[in-house]
Amino acid sequence: MNETGSGGTPPGRLGDDENSSAVNSPSTEASTGPPTGDGTRADPRPPAVILGICSGVIVTVVMKHVYAVAWLSTLVTAAVAVAVIVLGLWLVPRRQVKDALKPVVTKVSARVVTAVAWGAAGAAVMALVLLAAAGVHGLRERAGSCAQPLDLRVLTTPEALTPLRAAAAEFADHSEDRGCRKYGVTVVPEAGPVPLYDGFRLLWRRSAPADERHAEGEQLFGPQPDIWIPSSTAEYDFIPKAPGQVAPSIQAGGRTAPSGTGSAAGASAPNGAGDPKFRPRGSLGTSPLVLALFTKAHESVADPIAAPLATKTSDLLSRFEDVDVRLRAIARPVPETSSAALAVTPALYDALPGDDSKDERFTGPAGLVAPDAVSLLCQFRERAAAQDSDPPDDIAVAVPEQVLHDYDMGRPLGDRCGAVDPGAAPYAKWRLHPYYATDLPTLDYPFVQVRWRGQDTEERDAAVTEFRRWLDRHPLIRQGFRDGRGTVPPAPEGDTRHFYLSRLQRTVGDRVISPNVALTSAKGVQETLDRIGAARPRISVSLMLDVSASMGGAAQAREGVRLARGTAFLRSLVSQLQSNDRVGLQVSSQKAPSDGAGTFGNVPQDTASPDHKNAITSRLQAVASGGGDQPLSDAIAAADLGTGRPNLILVTDGQSTRTNPQLSSRVRWLAGEFRGRHPDLRLTVVLTGPATCRSAPVKQIVAALRPADGPGCVALTGASEVEQAAELLSGLR
Amino acid sequence: MRFLPGDRTAWISAASGAVLVLAAGLTVFLWPDDSYPAMKADCHREELFVAGGTDVSLKNQRRALIRQWNGGRYPDGRPHPHATLVEVSDSTDLQRSQLKAVQESGSCAYDVLIMDNTWTAQFAEGGFLRPLDGIGDLRDFFPAALRTGERDGKQYAVPFNVDVGLLYVHEGETPPTGWPGLLNSDIALQLADYDGLTVNALEAVWNDGGQGLLTGDDRPSVEELRTRVYPALVRLTSRARGPLGPSRRYEELGSIEAFASGTRLMRNWPYAFSSLATEPRMRTPDGGRLRFGVTALPGRTVLGGQNLAVSEQSPNPDAAADLVEFLSGTGSQRLLFSCGGFAPGRYSALGLTPERHSPADVNVRACSSLTGERPGPGETELPDRAQLTQLGRAVVTALERAEPRPVTPHYGTFSGTFRGCVQKIFDRGGTDPESFARAVNRSLDGEAASC
């Protein structure tokens, strides 16, 4: 080794006592404080504290930058390692190094060691330069305006919309760094298990294209979700999935669990590409289905001694009867569009006396048809606000406990009902009180990551993971849910921002909320749908859609054109039909006569299988308006009424008397000869506007064929098409 | 200089070490990390996908235009590549959520994007859009509308339809000539908590001492926000708590219903004209004459509308640009106006030229004369040529006074913050000029803030 070269020990350098003391002295002084003029020592703390704070801030800022960029941490580690080696070579006396490395270096030329040392030094300098450049770049980025937050799309059951939106907003705020949000989250409600079955199968399109000539448009169900939070594992299992579509599930604690499709509808690949891919990532909390009574009925039933959790639903019903609370019905949302309703239906069928058909009628009371639990409770809240009626004490409501919590606590209910003051007299009067039974299922709200081909990036995956972990740390028990064991967690003192279920106790009274519930799983969706289908009367529906040019005009009560409103309504209606129902579609205009053999849009009546329903919805998607009106009476006369008791649903803007010539004679013909041929026909005219049910010629046509057991004419309102279709179907059944 | 290498070998070694680290750093920085098993899409396709909101144009005119494109050919006889309109949602927020998520994922799913004109800055900044270089005759577009598709001197988007605030007036009502008179009238605005509140509040500010602020690229100073914008909103508050009280519940449809039900005046976009024209209450019993008129607002108005852009990830950018040119061309724009009820983005669609564009020169045709489809026996064409001419004149007049909303990649953050502050001011919720100015200023940079 060259002792006099550049690699040699510099004079007075490492190991030099003088220099060592010089290095040590400032720290010594700092620890004791510098002497002042009067011989006393100044307080040593301020400079030390300032130094400490400054270095702390610098280290924090540097480390934040380092951790923000994955490769920076590797670079820093390498730089530190090299710097330590080089420093070591400088600091340790040459002699000692030589002695220590003697066994090694005796065989290595000194020139090589020098080269390696300088190579390492050069590398260290470059690493520092790169680090500085990265730091400057990072600081410049942060000095400017915020970067775009990554948008996560979350789909959830309508019942969980309010809690999920609250949690997502907190997550987005939590991701804020110096005022800039890292993530944005859009939470949208799902359309229900049956529409979702097709949605995932058709890569989020509402229907497959009708044919090549009519494939200029396709509609999506909204944003494609990165995260899907169904109400139960049963709903998740209902979606058809090929084995390759399901990634191993990740439990809340990050453990990987074996996966299975478990699809009740069959696990065949839904499409050639095997898309999208699902990854269940554990439950977000639980909420049991409850039967709820309004205050007056509750006051009769409430028993401070009785256990809040009954063994069976039938016991609960007996308890109601024992105190003379005679239920007229149990209001439950439409099962085809509500997983919660699907989950509770078998338990209600089993608990109620009589056969399933009778029970089905009992659980679908007229006037209380709603596509989901929040819409159902929203109807009650609207009635409460109107203050023109009393709560129906002879009705029990079957809804998830967390929705009841949101209703009683005045939180928003879906997109339609905003927040209210729960203590205000009208709302207090309409308060609902929960009743629990062990055989009522408990919903488990699984968190499912959904990956779409072409939209699957590491950043999106990381964002989903971050949201999931955040929900582990900030669970939905803060939003009215129970924990994973079905227990009501206590509300922390002082936390008034969140909605803990335990606070509902103060509102509904002592010993009403069951502290624990059984984690009874919901039955399979297809199994339940089959049972409901068997319980319901089979119906035969002939759909007739006016596609004349005037249907291209503006609709009433909603943005868009009449044809789009009409098709959206019919699409919702078709999606709610069961596989043992029958349905067909005809279109009507001078250009596309309803009895024309080659008219695009006509689909002969058949059983409502998924393929047949898709054939209808794809044509509804593709039809265009054009041509003059085909008089309503002609359209009705040309209707393919199929077998069974015929139900004709005619969707139109109402036309005018000018396009319905000889109206009187046509009306007489309908009421006479036509009615004679179809004595059981039930006609329902559905109006998109601007005509009303009192406008001619609709009024005369409906009067001629008015059924004894139907409305004859309904006008579409601002409410959702799903809800209005459910109402009409309920009436027909 | 004992810290420097002393000989050639040392210099070479040091340089080699530095180069090695530099190479390693550049490799890590520039080399994409392929360890994530992404589900990649097959982008080899010729079909075009146009993504936007639900087609709410009358007669589904957007879909009709796509159908027309699919049936058409290039001048050299080649058929156009097939195009499909992907309708995401009728909610603007959900449209943006889907389009942004798809584009920021680098997906090739969409070729042409139909975007609200306030998204241009965000999408161009994010690298989601391809500059449009080959669109012919840009001078024919309304200049202010065309500028909403620009970013950093590049044209990323062209107008598909424009929106300007118009004043709808009941038959027999004399429209006010000034802004104060307008706000003191029996008028329906859109003051519910959605982007319409931002639009209506901006118009109030621009017409009441805040002209030139919070519009386009120019950033107002905190002082201007405090001394010119905030006081204008405070002055609007007295009306919002008085005659404009019902408008706090109205979005666009609510105000149309209020106008049809008897409110004497309404501020709304051009599409409301067709909606009202088909409303029986707004026509004479014989169905021929409208019982309302439309004119420009007496002051400055927001320039809204939707633009067409080509996705940066489009596998067929040239064909996509051709489709954009077709959809924004004069023929398509005429159909969108006369049949679809949307105000066009071009002079020529209203029979004007860049040189001759006074409202009196508007010359339009009814839908039936463009399509050749006459109304059926006993049916009346609505709107007819005279009604369309009235609407066209109002649009041209309003366009001369129209200004864009603030151009920022963080428009969504701005709008949310601004209308939150306006609500607080309306409710006298305790916000002060300083908090307002600070919050709005921060929101323009995308920082989360509230009053």
Image: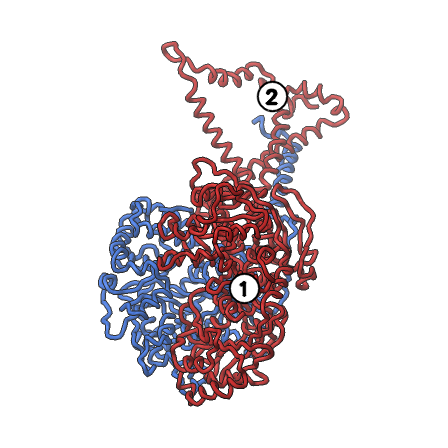
Residue B290 is situated, as x and y percent measured from the top left of the image, at 31, 78
Q: Amino acid at mark 1?
A: Arg
Q: In the depicted view, which residue is nearer to us: A715 or A8?
A: A715
Residue B393 is situated, as x and y percent measured from the top left of the image, at 32, 74
In the image: residue A212, left or right of residue A505: right
Residue A304 is situated, as x and y percent measured from the top left of the image, at 48, 41
Q: Is residue B106 visible?
A: no
Measuring 52% from the left and 50% from the top, which residue is drawn there?
A319
Measuring 41% from the left and 50% from the top, which residue is drawn there?
A410
Report the quarter where the N terminus of chain B lies.
top right
Q: Which quadrant of the figure has residue A415?
A: bottom left
Q: Which chain is red?
A: A
- Residue under numbered circle 2: A10
Residue reaching furthest to the top = A39
- Residue under numbered circle 1: A361
Label 2 environment density (alpha carbons within 10 Å; few <14, some 14–19, many ≥20)? some
The colour one sees for chain B in the rendered image is: blue
